[in-house]
Image (spheres, rainbow, N blue to C red):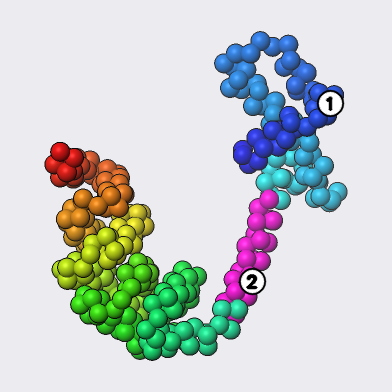
C-alpha cells in the first residue's frame, strides 16, 4: 500500500493541473519552513491524506455496506476480498494450463524417442530444453519416463562423451547438467529421480577423462554451482552435513580450474554463500583463493 501511495502522489504531482488544484492539506503546509520534522512527518502525511481523499469515491460500495467499506479499513477489506477472488481464479487458470499441457503429451513422448534414435546434437539440445521447461512448470517427469529409459540413455551418453566419440557434444553438456539438476528435485517412490552425488560424479568423470576444461568441464559446473550455492542456500529441508559435503567436492573441482575466468565468476557465488553462513569459513576459503590467484598474476 505504501508503494501504491507513493506512485499515486507522484502521478498527482506530475499532472499539468496540479498547480491549479492544490489540496487543502498542501495549503496548510505551504507556509511552513522545510525541516526534518516536515520531511519525516508532515510531507508524508500530506501525501497520504491527499491520496485517500482522491480515492474516497472508490472506497464506497453500497449504502448497505457503507460502514464497512468507507475509510482505510474498508479499503483494505475490499482489497482482501478482491485478492481472494483472484486466488480462486488463478487456481482455475492452473487447471486450464494443466489440461493444456496434457495435449502435448504425445508430442513430448515422440521427442523422447527421437532423442534416443537421433545423433543430431541440435535436436537433442532442443529436447533437453523442452524437458527442462516442463519440469519447471511442475509437470510430473515420472509419468513421462516411468521406467527411466530416457534418463538411463542420457547417463549412458557420458561414456561416449568421456571417450570423445561424439563431435560437437560440448553443446549438450550445459543442457544435460541443467536437466539432471532439475530432476534431483523430482521424486520417484519417495526417492530422488537422480541424486546430486551422482550428478557430481558424472561431472568428475568428465574432468578425469582429460577433455578440454573450457568446453566440457566448466559448462558442466555452472548448473551445479548455481544450484548448490544459490538455490539450495535457503532450502531448510536439505541435510546440512550432506549439502556441505557436496559443496566441498564442487569447490575442490573449481580450485583445480581457477585459472579460467568463468570459474572466477562462479567463485563469487561460492564466497557470498560462505560469507552468509560462516564468516570463518569465508575467510579461510577467500585466503585459499587469493593464494592461488596471485601466482597466476606474477
In the rendered image of this protein, does residue 154 appear above or below residue 266?
below
Q: Toward which corner of the image does residue 215 lie, by quadrant?
A: bottom left
Percent across and percent down for residue 287 are 16, 40
- The residue positioned 66% from the left and 66% from the top of the image is 89
* Label 2 crowd (10 A; few <14 / some 14-19 / many >=20): few
In the rendered image of this protein, does residue 105 appear above or below residue 85?
below
Foreground: 8 or 15?
A: 15
- Secondary structure predominantly adopted by residues drawn in magenta: helix
In the rendered image of this protein, does residue 51 appear above or below residue 208?
above
All told, the count of numbered labels is 2
Percent across and percent down for residue 227 are 33, 60
Percent across and percent down for residue 5 are 67, 37
- The residue positioned 24% from the left and 52% from the top of the image is 260
Part of the protein shown in magenta: 79-99
Q: Nearer the viewer, mark 2 or mark 1?
A: 1
Number of the label disc, if any, that sits on residue 55: none
- The residue positioned 62% from the left and 62% from the top of the image is 87
Residues under numbered marks 2 and 1 in contact, where contact means CB atoms less than 8 Å apart: no
- Callout 2: SS: helix
Q: Toward which corner of the image does residue 210 lie, by quadrant?
A: bottom left
Number of the label disc, if any, that sits on residue 92: 2
Number of the label disc, if any, that sits on residue 21: 1
Q: Is residue 192 covered in magenta?
A: no
Residue 2 as seen in the image, left or right of residue 14: left
Foreground: 174 or 79?
A: 174
Q: Is residue 63 visible?
A: yes
Residue 250 as seen in the image, left or right of residue 97: left
Q: How far apart are the two marked residues, 2 and 1, measured between alpha carbons? A: 45 Å
Amino acid at each position: 500500500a505504501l508503494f501504491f501511495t507513493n506512485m499515486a502522489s507522484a502521478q498527482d504531482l506530475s499532472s499539468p493541473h496540479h498547480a491549479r488544484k492544490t489540496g487543502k492539506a498542501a495549503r496548510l503546509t505551504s507556509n511552513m519552513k522545510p525541516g526534518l520534522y516536515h520531511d519525516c512527518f508532515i510531507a508524508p502525511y500530506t501525501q497520504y491524506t491527499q491520496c485517500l481523499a482522491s480515492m474516497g469515491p472508490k472506497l464506497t460500495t453500497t449504502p448497505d455496506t457503507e460502514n464497512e467499506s468507507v475509510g482505510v479499513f474498508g479499503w483494505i477489506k475490499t482489497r482482501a476480498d478482491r485478492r481472494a477472488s483472484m486466488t480462486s481464479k488463478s487456481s482455475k487458470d492452473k487447471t486450464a494450463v494443466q489440461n493444456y499441457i496434457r495435449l502435448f503429451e504425445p508430442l513430448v513422448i515422440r521427442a523422447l524417442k527421437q532423442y534416443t534414435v537421433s545423433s543430431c546434437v541440435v535436436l537433442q539440445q532442443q529436447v533437453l530444453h523442452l524437458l527442462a521447461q516442463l519440469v519447471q512448470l511442475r509437470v510430473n517427469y515420472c509419468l513421462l519416463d516411468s521406467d527411466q529409459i530416457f534418463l538411463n540413455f542420457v547417463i549412458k551418453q557420458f561414456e561416449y562423451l568421456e571417450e570423445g566419440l561424439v563431435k560437437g557434444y560440448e553443446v549438450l553438456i550445459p543442457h544435460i547438467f541443467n536437466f539432471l539438476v532439475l530432476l534431483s528435485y523430482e521424486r520417484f517412490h519417495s526417492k530422488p529421480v537422480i541424486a546430486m552425488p551422482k550428478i557430481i560424479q558424472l561431472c568428475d568423470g568428465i574432468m578425469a577423462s582429460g577433455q578440454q576444461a573450457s568446453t566440457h568441464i566448466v559448462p558442466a559446473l555452472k548448473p551445479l554451482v548455481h544450484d548448490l550455492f544459490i538455490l539450495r542456500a535457503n532450502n531448510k529441508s536439505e541435510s546440512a552435513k550432506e549439502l556441505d559435503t557436496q559443496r566441498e567436492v564442487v569447490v575442490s573441482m573449481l580450485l583445480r580450474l581457477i585459472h579460467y575466468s568463468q570459474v572466477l565468476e562462479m567463485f563469487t557465488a561460492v564466497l557470498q554463500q560462505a560469507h552468509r553462513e560462516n564468516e570463518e569459513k569465508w575467510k579461510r576459503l577467500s585466503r585459499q583463493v587469493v593464494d592461488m590467484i596471485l601466482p597466476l598474476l606474477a
